[in-house]
């Protein structure tokens, strides 16, 4: 995991979020309607994970942590499901031995809001503050 600036995170998501919004719309999702959106963040240390979870809860997220080895995508759709050319996926890193903590933060919002520059900037700021990687967001197709 490499640390990024707020601007780099925002620019990365400006590139990838339209692809996810387009794919959701293709699958019949109204991107303007609120629904549960799952945001995935990765921490290298437990202290960063705890601090980030506390802040996310204050921002209105429902937060849970997941063992990186037990992570399961379930029946949702996220960017990793539609963008095979992504070079910022954790599995593509050269350092596969790196331990990390997975944070799943869920909030009720529209996909359009999740993809907005304003929202991504908030998440990116939190990531830089707590040394996290923002893996992206997704949503269940069954809502």
Image (cartoon, rainbow, N blue to C red):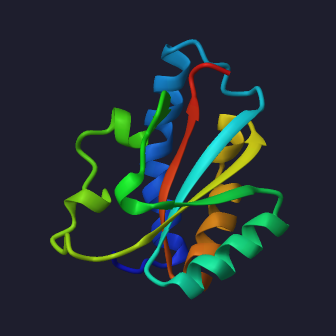
Quadrant in which the N terminus appears: bottom left
Identify the residue shown where x is 71% and y is 37%.
36
Asked if residue 94 can be seen in this view, the reply is yes
- Quarter-of-image position of residue 8: bottom left
What residue do we see at 58% from left, 12% from top? Answer: 28
- The residue located at (49%, 37%) in the rendering is 18
Up the image or down, 44 lies above or below 32; here it is below
Q: Horizontally, is 16 left or right of 62 in the view?
A: left
Q: Is residue 123 shown above or below 85?
A: below
In the picture, the quarter occupied by the C terminus is: top right
Q: Is any part of residue 88 visible from this angle?
A: no
How far from the left and from the top, in percent, is residue 88? 31, 60
Number of numbered labels in the structure image: 0
Place of residue 136 in the rendered image (x, y in percent of width and height, measured from the top left): 50, 52
Residue 77 left/right relative to 54: left
Q: Residue at x 67, y 19 (%)?
A: 30
Q: Nearer the viewer, residue 117 or 58?
A: 58
Nearest the viewer among 24 and 11 is 24
């Amino acid at each position: 995991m490499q640390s990024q600036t707020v601007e780099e995170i925002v620019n990365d998501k400006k590139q990838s979020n339209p692809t996810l919004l387009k794919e959701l719309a293709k699958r019949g999702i109204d991107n303007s309607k609120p629904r549960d959106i799952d945001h995935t963040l990765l921490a290298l240390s437990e202290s960063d994970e705890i601090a980030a979870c506390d802040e996310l809860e204050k921002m209105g997220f429902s937060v849970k942590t997941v063992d990186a080895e037990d992570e399961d995508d379930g029946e949702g759709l996220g960017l990793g499901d539609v963008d095979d050319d992504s070079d910022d996926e954790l599995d593509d890193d050269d350092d596969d031995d790196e331990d990390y903590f997975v944070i799943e933060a869920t909030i009720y919002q529209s996909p359009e809001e999740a993809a907005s520059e304003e929202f991504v900037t908030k998440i990116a700021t939190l990531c830089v503050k707590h040394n996290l990687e923002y893996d992206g967001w997704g949503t269940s197709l069954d809502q």
